[in-house]
Image (cartoon, rainbow, N blue to C red):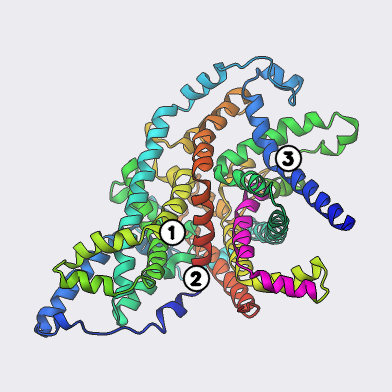
Amino acid sequence: MKKKTLLSFANFTLLLLFAVFALFPIYMAVINSFKTQKEIFNNVLALPSSLRFDNYLEAMSQINFFNSMWNTVVVTFVGMTGIIVCGALAGYKLARTKGKISTLFFLLFIASMLMPFHSIMITLTQIAKGLSVQGSTVGLGLIYIGLGVNMAIFLCHGFVKTIPKELEESAKIDGCSELQTFVKIIFPLLRPILITIAILNLLWLWNDFLLPLLMLTNVNDYTLILSINMFFGEYNNDWPSILASLVITAVPVIVFYMVFQKFIMKGIAEGAVKG
Amino acid sequence: MLSAKKQTAGVKRKWYLPITIHRRPAEKKYKSFLSMLLFLGPALLFYSVFLLIPAIGGGYYSMTDWNGLARTHDFVGINNYIQALRDDPDFIHSIGFTLKYAVVILVVQNIAALGLAVMIEERAKSKTFFRTVFFMPNMLSLIITAFMWSFIFTTVLPQLSEWAFLTFLDQSWTSDPKISFYSIAIASLWRGIGYMMIIYIAALQGVPKHLKEAAIIDGASPFQTLLYVTLPMIMHAVTICLFMTLNDAFRVFDLVYALTGGGPGRSTQVIALNIYEEAFSGNYRYGYASAKAMILFIIVLVITMIQVSIMKKREVES
């Protein structure tokens, strides 16, 4: 029994140590975002002498916070909605159609899942320029549909197979068209997998960097991540404001995480197992 | 993705619905084509324009000397590939650096994530707390992660090293090529471990209790139970996590871009950063950069295929 207590204690200590490691950078960023430059260089570990919100005002104006936030919301919303709708439609149809053509399309969609983004980015940039979707937040959202739909199709395809066919058949007998059946019967049934898809894509789109960097040419269209990157590039010694900008960008994400933690973790575990 | 083949095969369905039998074949064909178009159309449109065509285009341009500015370009066959692999020390170095990074991340991230998952599952009350804390870094974008760690490396650690027992922290974390490899790895692990941990926890919860109990009754130590009972049972999760870690490690870009910018010099340049530089910062050698991008794709493809085929053999069913 004694050995067991000792083991449990060691276990707890190790976990606690790792918790310190996980929280330390965040804690440092938060406390130092309230200090002056001088306070930081005097003692980085000390708590701030007073809660200076000046840094936050400075950071918010530097990264154009509300505008950047809105841009990020637009990109994420367009991309996510598109991925869910297109993915559910195609995933359902491919799972319910038999035959070589259907299989071929399915393989066509999932074949690219291993392709690194960097392998397509050069040609993609050219195409986006040609189609004039470069330089617009909505355009960027549309590109995300193209890049993310394959995974959604794959996940929906797997899920539809677990839905009994009888439901659709009876809807058909009742006079529903194929699209009506999809909207009224299938789409609501797909909800669990659609939540998984939504969460995985939300995290990806909200935090993505390279594609927005290539696509958004105008500062007014910048997403939060791009604005922060630009701010850091210009004032990389102004730690108080930079840390404030990092904290203020992280806050919405952390709040979202705290509220939807259960769904997020379930989404990730399921996305991984089925992927 | 891994079980795609299994899923498409082996599912038998009825061909005809009683309702459609009386239709003429031509009309039926037209209708089914129309419904295919309706359901697949939107996905296919975006997918073709923004992924499929760029991918095919990338493959084609990798065999040209296209520089992005000129309207014309010549076909040069596999010359770009030869040049990249033979005459481009920076690119070769970036492959080596990425490989080293991938190996370190693969080993440390998975061992740490699995270890933490096992340890967390042992706890009763503090389980949720630790899970929440460990996964939190993963919510932050890689760019924010990089800047936070940049603050730690350039300001916090040098200051802490003034204390006598912490002098070892006095390193040029982001400006010494030898050290900055570890800086990148630390920041990456900080964010990545929690993600894999979640997958491992889910897998551990799926292991039937009676198997573990049986092992304990048979006199197995906790460590033996883990090694011989639990681990084989969660092999599918290990396969997935290794696959995801490898995939991400070879594509690493944001973190290195924001933390060291590939520097000092090009000492911490990863493959993706090398491609980006070749194509977008000054050089505009699109054809040549495309060839490098194809090499990256082939590396990812080959390595993950090998990994999956090795791991698949080790999986067991309960």
| Helix, strand or loop at mark 1 | loop
State how far apart marks 1 and 2 are (Cα): 18 Å
Mark 1 or 3 closer to N-term?
A: 3
Residue B114 position, x and y percent, is 69, 60
Q: Is residue A185 left or right of residue A226?
A: left
Q: Is residue A218 left or right of residue A254?
A: left
Residue highlighted by disc 3: A20
Do callouts 3 and 2 point to residues on the same chain?
no
The reply to whether callout 3 and callout 2 are in contact (CB within 8 Å) is: no
Residue A59 % position (x, y) = 52, 24
Q: Position of residue B86 (x, y in %)?
A: 62, 66
> Which residue is under mark 2?
B78
Q: Residue at x 62, y 57 (%)?
A: B196
Residue A178: tell me if it is visible.
yes
Query: Chain ID for label 1?
Result: A
Q: Residue at x 75, y 42 (%)?
A: B176
Horizontal side of residue B122 vs B39, given as left or right? right
Q: Are marks 1 and 3 in contact (CB under 8 Å)?
A: no
Q: Where B231 falls versus B143 (above or below)?
A: below
Which residue matches tag 1? A120
> Which region of the structure is painted magenta?
B188-217
Q: Amino acid at mark 2?
A: Ile
Spatial separation of the CA atoms under disc 1 and disc 3: 40 Å
